[in-house]
Structures are given as structure tokens and as C-alpha cells.
Amino acid sequence: MQAFKYFSVMVVMLFASATASFGQTLTDILNKHYAAMGGIAKISGIKSQYVEGVTMAQGQEIPFKRWGVNNKSMRLEFDVMGTSNVQVVNQKSGWIYMPIMGQLSPEDMDSATFSAMKGLLDVSGSELYDYASKGKMVTYIGKDTVNGKPAYKLKVTTKEGNVGYVFLDAGTYYIVRAKNSLTIGGKEQELVSDFSEYQKNPEGYVYPGKSSQGGMMTMVINKMEVNQPMADSLFIKPAK
């Protein structure tokens, strides 16, 4: 009986140790990721973000500008075929003005587009930072490979129940790939985004200078500023 008692205690201790070790693995990976992105102080200190860049798709170069107030509002402007187009989203709704689509005045955003764009409200240094307070659950799946290099695969579940996967390079701890499911035209499709050419702006904030989606579209960021004043009028839907 005494031997069985000791055996039972050993089993419990080993199980607890294994659980703690697995949990620490995720914690360690995330902490190294935060450090790579400039550190927790930098990430948590981002209140707003302004980005300029170019999107290349179907042989066209499309200049864009994006303003974001962290977890509150986002405005995207892009010029294509002589038209200036706008998409704005906040926590509850969004609106669009797309002359390129023949639209003559600003209109409310449909639910599918709103759902797809709402994630852009998070302009912190990493979507993985402080994930629990954002209603997300992150699980370490294991090691994988991205572009021939070892990577850590993390499963991310949003508070809405949407599931995606984030891959962190095992050497740099930068996010190098993200997989998400989107509903486009009533059909669910997988969107794979690759991130590269990480840069650091003068204030010490790290960001991917280039992203691509399956060879169909590539986005290059030429300028990134943080914590600059932004007028509320940028996000207000104009009267028709």
C-alpha cells in the first residue's frame, strides 16, 4: 500500500511537471516573439498607427494609406484607375466609398466585409500580445516548416469562434505566415499570408515591410508612424 501511495504521488508530480513544461513552452515562445517585436513596453504603448505603402495586384501598383486608432477605428484609402476609394471600420460597424465599383456616395459596409476587416482594428505591435484580454485563445500546436525554415505553429481562436493559425520563425520569432478562413461570395476560402522583410522604424517599432497572399497580391510598407494625432473626422461617415 505504501509503495502504491508513493507511485501515485510520483504520477501526479510527473503529470503536473509535464503540463507546466508544455505551458512554459508557449509562454517562452510568446515572450521571445514580444522581444523580437521591440518589447512589451513598445507593443503596449501603441495607441495609433499610420501606414503608407503600395499594393501590387494583377499587374497594377495601388498606393494606399491607413490610419488606425488601436481597437477603435481604422481608415483605409487607396487609389486605383484614377479613383480614390475609402473603407472605414470601427468596433460596431463600417462604411465604404468605392467609386472604382461605380459607387456614387458612402454606404454602410456589408456584414461579410465588416467581419473580414474588423481584425485590422488591432494595430498593436503583435496580434498575439495580451491575447486573453482580446477574447482570444492561443494554443501551441508544435513545430512546422515555412519556406524551408523551422517555425512554431500556434492556433488562434477568436472570441467569435473563428480559428486561424500563426507561424513564428524559430530563429527570429517573427510572424512569417498566417492562415485564416474567409467567406467570399458565400463560399469559405482559406487565406494564406506570408510576412517578410521586417524593419524597425526610428522609434524602435518593428513591422513586416512586405506581405503576400499566394502570389496574387503583394503589399509593401514604405512608411510607418505610431502615436501621431488623428482627427476624429477621418472615421466619420460623410453625409450623402
Image: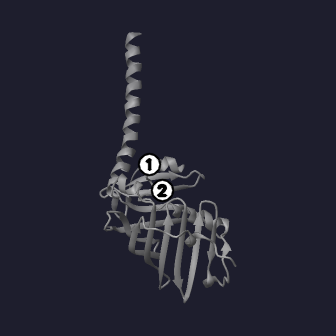
Residue 56 sits above or below residue 192 on the image: below
Q: CA distance from mark 1 to mark 2?
A: 9 Å
- Which mark is drawn over residue 27? none
Residue 80 sits above or below residue 131 on the image: below
Residue at 41 percent across and 35 percent down: it is 19
Tag 2 residue? 165
Badges 1 and 2: C-beta atoms under 8 Å apart?
yes
**Any part of residue 189 in sight:** no
Q: Is residue 58 left or right of residue 109?
A: left
Name the element at disc 1: strand
Residue at 38 percent across and 34 percent down: it is 18
Q: Quadrant of the N terminus?
A: top left
Residue at 42 percent across and 62 percent down: it is 177
Q: What colouring method underlies this structural image? A: one colour
Name the element at disc 2: strand
- Which mark is drawn over residue 141? 1
Label 2 Cα neighbours within 10 Å, binned few <14 / some 14-19 / many ≥20: some
Label 1 Cα neighbours within 10 Å, binned few <14 / some 14-19 / many ≥20: few
